[in-house]
Image (tube, rainbow, N blue to C red):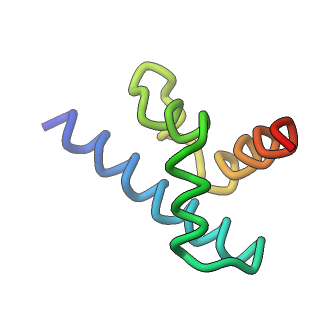
Amino acid sequence: MVKEGLNYLVTRTTQELVKIVSEDNNITVEEAMDIVYNSKTFELLCDLETHLYYESPAYVYEILKEELEKNK
């Protein structure tokens, strides 16, 4: 039961993150999904030990933006 709840939080945050990335960068949802799902930030979000899933999608997006800036 607890793991299902945590998976829900990860899924919900990921959905919102994809939406934010798409809107903020004026790209398609598919392009945003590619960015999100292939990021280290997404790996951290899925790692239940980091507790990143408790943070808001906006906060996670800030982490993703920093990651993307470093990788330019």
Residue 64's x, y, as percent? 70, 45
Residue 25's x, y, as percent? 77, 72
Hey, which quadrant is residue 2 in on the image?
top left
> Which residue is painted at 40% across and 46% down in the image?
10
Residue 68's x, y, as percent? 78, 45
Horizontally, residue 61 falls left or right of residue 10, namely right
Image quadrant in which the N terminus is located: top left
Q: Residue furthest left?
A: 1
Residue 72's x, y, as percent? 87, 44
* Residue nearest the observer in this picture, 43 or 5: 43
* Residue nearest the observer in this picture, 32 or 53: 32
Hey, which quadrant is residue 27 in on the image?
bottom right
> Which residue is painted at 25% across and 44% down in the image?
5
How many marks are shown on the rendered structure?
0
Q: Is residue 60 above or below residue 41?
A: below
> Which residue is painted at 19% across and 42% down in the image?
4
> Which residue is painted at 39% across and 26% down in the image?
48
Q: Is residue 30 above or below residue 59?
A: below
Horizontally, residue 11 falls left or right of residue 37, namely left
Q: Is residue 13 above or below residue 28?
A: above
Q: Residue furthest top?
A: 49
